[in-house]
Amino acid sequence: MADTKVALVTHYYDKIGVAVFQVLAPIKVDDKLKIKGKDSEFEQIVASMQVEHQNIQKAKKGDNIGIKVDQPVKEGDEVFKVD
């Protein structure tokens, strides 16, 4: 089954390992995501996410969310939900 594109990386805070995603399709805690860039590709489970420093369980299209990522990412990296 094809992976679904759900977000784009708009910023990365390297000191704290947090990426800001512009959400294109719903994402929820416990989803498995694949983050794919020019130089890297990895998968991880969404342990938690935040909007304006508040924990949320679901993000909808148009939200900008922060997620702690396992590896460094770059602006423009694509985020896919793994089925």
Image (tube, helix red, strand yellow):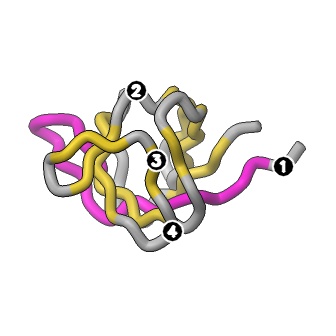
Secondary structure mostly seen in the magenta stretch: strand
Between tags 3 and 1, which lies in front? 3
Please give the residue where the numbered disc 1 appears in the rendered image.
2
Please give the residue where the numbered disc 2 appears in the rendered image.
47
Q: Which of pointers 2 and 4 lies earlier in the amino acid sequence?
A: 2
Which type of secondary structure does the marked residue at label 3 adopt?
Answer: strand
Query: CA–CA distance between discs 3 and 1?
Result: 22 Å
| Quadrant showing the C terminus | top right
Query: CA–CA distance between discs 2 and 3?
Result: 12 Å
Displayed quadrant of residue 67: top left
Please give the residue where the numbered disc 3 appears in the rendered image.
58
Please give the residue where the numbered disc 4 appears in the rendered image.
61
Q: Which amino acid type corresponds to the residue marked 4 in the rendered image?
A: Lys
Between tags 1 and 2, which lies in front? 2
Query: CA–CA distance between discs 2 and 4?
Result: 19 Å
- Identify the residue shown where x is 38% and y is 66%: 63
Q: Nearer the viewer, residue 19 or 64?
A: 64
Between tags 2 and 3, which lies in front? 3
- Determine the residue located farthest toward the bottom in the rendered image: 62
Q: Which of pointers 2 and 3 lies earlier in the amino acid sequence?
A: 2
Q: Is residue 51 left or right of residue 31?
A: left
Which type of secondary structure does the marked residue at label 2 adopt?
Answer: loop
- Horizontal and vertical percent for residue 73? 36, 47
| Quadrant showing the N terminus | top right
Magenta segment: 3-19
- Determine the residue located farthest toward the right in the rendered image: 1
Query: CA–CA distance between discs 4 and 1?
Result: 20 Å
Q: Which of pointers 1 and 2 lies earlier in the amino acid sequence?
A: 1
